[in-house]
Image (cartoon, rainbow, N blue to C red):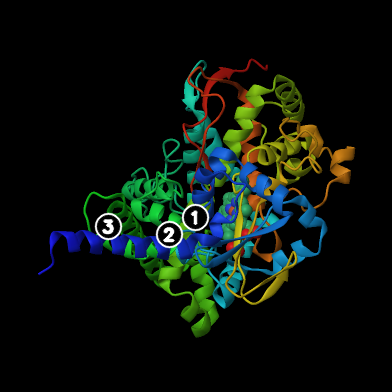
Amino acid sequence: MVSVVEEYALTLVAMAVGFLVVAYLYEPYWRVRHVPGPVLLPLIGHVHLLAEHGPDVFSMLAKKHGPVFRFHMGRQPLIVVADAEFCKEAGIKKFKSISNRSMPSAIANSPIHQKGLFFSRGLRWTTMRNIIISLYQPSHLAGLIPTMESYIERAARNLDEGDEVVFSKLALTLFTDVIGHAAFGADFGLSGEPVSTDIDGKAGAGVKNGGTAVKVSEEFVKMHLHATTSLKMDLSGSLSIIVGNLVPFLQQPFRQVLKRIPGTADWKIDHVNHELSSQMDVIVADLMAAREREPASKQRKDLLSVVLGARERGGAAVQELLTPDYVSALTYEHLLVGSATTSFTLSSVVYLVAKHPEVEEKLLTEIDAFGPRGRVPTADDLKTRFPYLDQVVKESMRFYVVSPLVARETLERVEIGGYVLPKGTWVWLAPGVLAKDPINFPEPEQFRPERFDPAGNEEKCRHPYAFIPFGIGPRACIGEKFAIQEIKLAIIHLYSHYVFRHSKAMESPLEFQYGIVLNFKHGVKLQVIHRDKD
Ligand code: HEM
């Protein structure tokens, strides 16, 4: 029989042992002394504090430790590369060759997010990338302009003189519609009445696009938006994500328990991800069956159809790698990576232009000079007729870096910045720090699109790797040209008809939230003003 005193003593011993274990695991953190305590823990656990402190946290560490510095995540070694100096060294070349990604806690245990291109590795990654790369070639992208423009035009119909709008929401629905079309050949109808109706005539479902329509229910789209916004990496995420940020090895046990308790955020995320996977599996199975029945279905040019076509032609080897669950994840992933990033960028542009009248004036002059309202630019026009727009987009992407970290993991032993890294080391490059480096961007806190003028000194002198919002090397963003095309088309269309002012409800300074990418915490709230151009 254990007495009360013994029970207390045992509890104290257990607590002391627990403390020592945690101290042992986390002792390396405490050696990084110059970072304030409250910043350090979540930073090490994960990087959500980028949202509150911007890249300053890494800048601060880079100043102290040099361009490359080292921590441990528990016993997991972590190297952060966070300085333009590093770009001048051979180091960046080494970084490029590290092609696997480390897995953020928000993604761990979510197959629908893990099995896409982003987190795939080795032969599966090259196979997937080679299959879909044709969809991002200039000729294919040029063919998407009329569809992109029709969606932009439809979304802009929601804007009326004097309206107060949460612009970032409008941008998210618009670009989810655009990528929904590109990935599924379906019109989600989120930003307005469907451009075409599906075979049943229902909104939010598929478009007949050469062969049987892909049917995507409104429920699916709602769940997708929920799943996307739940991918938080800060303390507002689910309990298991928070635990995973702080004590990575405890995440799995916590998740396993919490996902079984109805009502918890983990339960909800698990439930939604499971539902999304099931619905994606049905969509994929339907389209596979349709392709066998109808030759017309084989002519579709959306991502899902292209992947299924490659599977059919590729034989057993490809089919083994690209099982239907991978096909689902690859297609679904595009909804995620192809909407949050671009809507953030478009919203940043409009927010920043509204704050800088001199930039707005130059931009309007260039857009008006292109021709009468409603003239749709070709791919060639986009490349050659809008040099200032080009600078505005780049400067906005530098000013607010939507993806401030590129997180990779070594596949083999590698030497980088004077450190010998064993296999499995997490190596993070911080484009958000590079973008605010005064050596490459004098007065980095000034919004000045002209710094990207190709004829200007600043642009000529800048290191080629100082501005890398789309990442670097063979693993860089596959959707860069797609993204820039739709963002430019949207800006040209919007500023042909409107200008925007910050709404009184818009907070200042802006607050951010760090999920799988950066987001505006309270949205970008603007007032719409109709232009009288003619
Ligand atoms: C402003 C918009 C965007 C930004 C800033 C952006 C940024 C990035 C970054 C930084 C990466 C990681 C690159 C690296 O590891 O070096 C990435 C990867 C990726 N992006 Fe984007 N992205 C954008 C839009 C898009 C769009 C529209 C799509 C799809 C249509 C897309 C699809 C992908 C995919 C599939 C990957 C993974 C590539 C791989 O691992 O092989 N992105 N993106």
Q: Is residue 210 left or right of residue 259?
A: right
Q: CA distance from mark 3 to mark 2?
A: 16 Å
Q: Locate residue 284, reporting x and y percent.
A: 40, 65
Q: Is residue 528 left or right of residue 435?
A: left
Residue 272, visible in the rendered structure: yes
Q: Locate residue 442, reporting x and y percent.
A: 80, 36
Find out whether the residues at labels 2 and 1 contact each other: C-beta distance under 8 Å: yes
| Residue at figure coordinates x 53%, y 52% from the top left | 337
What kind of element bears circle 2? loop
212 relative to 493, above or below: below
Q: Amino acid at mark 3?
A: Leu
**Residue to which mark 1 is pinned:** 45
| Residue at figure coordinates x 77%, y 57% from the top left | 86
Q: Quadrant of the C terminus?
A: top right
Can you tell which mark lies on residue 397? none
**Residue to which mark 3 is pinned:** 258
